[in-house]
Image (cartoon, grey):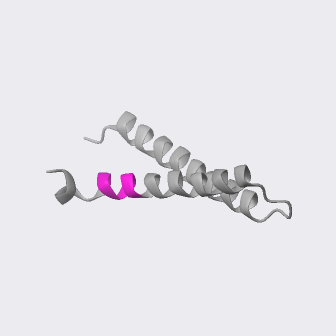
Amino acid sequence: MIDWSAFVVVALVSLFSAAALVSLYSVGLRLLTVDDRSAVRTAAGYACFVVCALGVLFGIYLIVPALHS
């Protein structure tokens, strides 16, 4: 029997995570491509990329069972 509530939870978390990662990446790009870049904007842009990369690595960790067995 299919557990539909678990399916809905996985679908919603996937949708939210994808939207969050795309948003973080686009904010990072926006912060790094403005004309008047300050040190704070540059650091914030790179911080967005780091958080995005950590999210991707965490997703890979969750998908690959050999990494957490």
Q: At 36% from the left edge and 37% from the top edge, which residue is drawn?
A: 6
> Residue 4: percent from the left, percent from the top?
37, 38
Q: At 53% from the left edge and 48% from the top edge, which residue is drawn?
A: 15
Q: At 31% from the left edge and 37% from the top edge, which residue is drawn?
A: 3
Give the left or right position of residue 39, taking residue 15 as reference: right
Return the residue found at the far right: 35
> Residue 46: percent from the left, percent from the top?
60, 57
* Residue 57, quarter of picture: bottom left
**Is 64 contained in the magenta span?**
no
Give the left or right position of residue 38, taking residue 44 as reference: right
Question: Is 36 placed above or below 15 here?
Answer: below
Give the left or right position of residue 43, taking residue 56 as reference: right
Return the residue found at the far left: 69
* Residue 35, quarter of picture: bottom right
Return the residue found at the far top: 5
Q: At 42% from the left edge and 37% from the top edge, which residue is drawn?
A: 9
> Residue 63: percent from the left, percent from the top?
30, 56
Camera-nearest residue between 12 and 2? 12
Quarter of the image with the N terminus is top left
> Residue 60: percent from the left, percent from the top?
35, 59
**Is 59 contained in the magenta span?**
yes
Number of on-image labels = 0
Give the left or right position of residue 42, taking residue 3 as reference: right
Camera-nearest residue between 40 and 53? 40
* Residue 42, quarter of picture: bottom right
> Magenta region, mostly helix, strand or loop?
helix
The magenta region covers: 57-62
